[in-house]
Amino acid sequence: MMSIRHFLQFKDFSREEHQYLFDRSRWIKNQFKSYQQYWPLTDRTLVMIFEKASTRTRLSFEAGMHQLGGSAIYLNTRDSQLGRGEPVEDAAQVISRMSDLVMIRTFEQDIIERFAANSRVPVINGLTNEYHPCQILADIFTYIEHRGCIQGKTVAWVGDANNMCNTWLQAAQVLDFKVHVSTPPGYELNPELIAGVDPAHYAVFADPMDACRGADLVTTDVWTSMGFEAENEARIKAFADWCVDGDMMRVAHPEAVFMHCLPAHRGEEVTAEVIDGPQSVVWDEAENRLHVQKALMEYLLLGRLETK
Ligand code: CP
Ligand code: NVA
């Protein structure tokens, strides 16, 4: 019997485990693209708990579980007891007795940690205020598909030091690459959230152009993340110069790709020229959520399988 593993932060898995997941994702994607039925999770149930909105995460987990032969149940705060003050520990006890796997999108990381500590089944982080590990799995898988191994490469992060940025830094530590971070004053990295990331794996730049210089991958995200809407007006002013545009892409490596986890706001964090331009891989990036999460769910429930 395999002990329970959770995927709450990118660093929960070793470099070797991530490498396995990328190899496995490629195989699972190929099966799917060649219309091969693959049902290793027959009779398994995924419960998805959403305390924030979602298009991609819900769709990719629900479709992914279905494609693996299992089923998925959607719960949100509005229609369940979760929004009415039931302790997260109690919810974890009950939900994990009726299901095989749980995915949670919520606010503080502490909520998902407490849920996992009381769960009988694996728990996956589908985004918290602090981290978004499933998205970074998809992003790195997408980079590997387009450009090969990410080890030794440089990723430019332009914008808010948010859940995506923190997770990129964790990934840089685990997979041995570097992140160039440029945030507006007042929105800098929080050292507590990137604890354990060696300073050799990131550098901070006041000017986003400098962060992008020579980068192999340029990426950004919304100026205002879910849960921070009250700050929107102040953020629009503070982030005005942190818009990824053609000039930033021109100083990056000529082969650089552009990524965005989506949803995007053209004219705010990225220009239409860039996100709809030839260096953008955002649609592959979005699709790959499906494939990497299928590999992740398979791994958490069945352990390591031989990839033919
Ligand atoms: N990128 C991402 O997680 O998208 P959703 O908010 O639509 O799930
Ligand atoms: N940083 C964004 C990502 C959305 C997928 C947020 O947390 O809202």
Image (cartoon, rainbow, N blue to C red):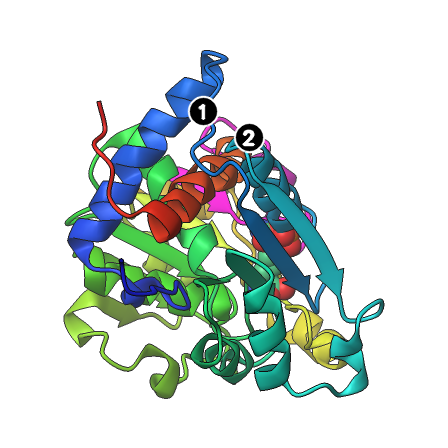
Q: Is residue 119 magenta?
A: no
The secondary structure making up most of the magenta span is: loop
Left or right of residue 258, residue 168 in this image: left
Q: Residue at x 54, y 49 (%)?
A: 261
Any part of residue 267 in sight: no
Q: CA distance from mark 2 to mark 1?
A: 7 Å
Residue 36 percent location from the top left of the image: 46, 15
Residue with the mark numbered 1? 38
Q: Which residues are magenta?
A: 257-281
- Which label was assigned to residue 25? none
Picture quadrant where residue 207 is located: bottom left
Q: Is mark 1 within 8 Å of ligand 1?
A: no
- Which label was assigned to residue 67? 2
Picture quadrant where residue 254 is located: top left
Q: Are marks 2 and 1 in contact (CB under 8 Å)?
A: yes
Left or right of residue 298, residue 153 in this image: left
Position of the N terminus by quadrant: bottom left
Residue 175 percent location from the top left of the image: 20, 55
Q: Earlier in the sequence, mark 2 or mark 1?
A: 1
Residue 30 percent location from the top left of the image: 39, 20
Q: Amino acid at mark 2?
A: Gln
Mark 2 neighbour density, 10 Å: few (under 14) some (14–19) many (20 or more): some
Residue closer to the observer: 40 or 54: 40
* Mark 2 residue element: helix
Q: Residue at x 46, y 71 (%)?
A: 183
Position of the C terminus by quadrant: top left
Q: Is residue 261 magenta?
A: yes
In the image, residue 119 sits, relative to residue 122, either above or below, namely below
Residue 142 percent location from the top left of the image: 38, 36
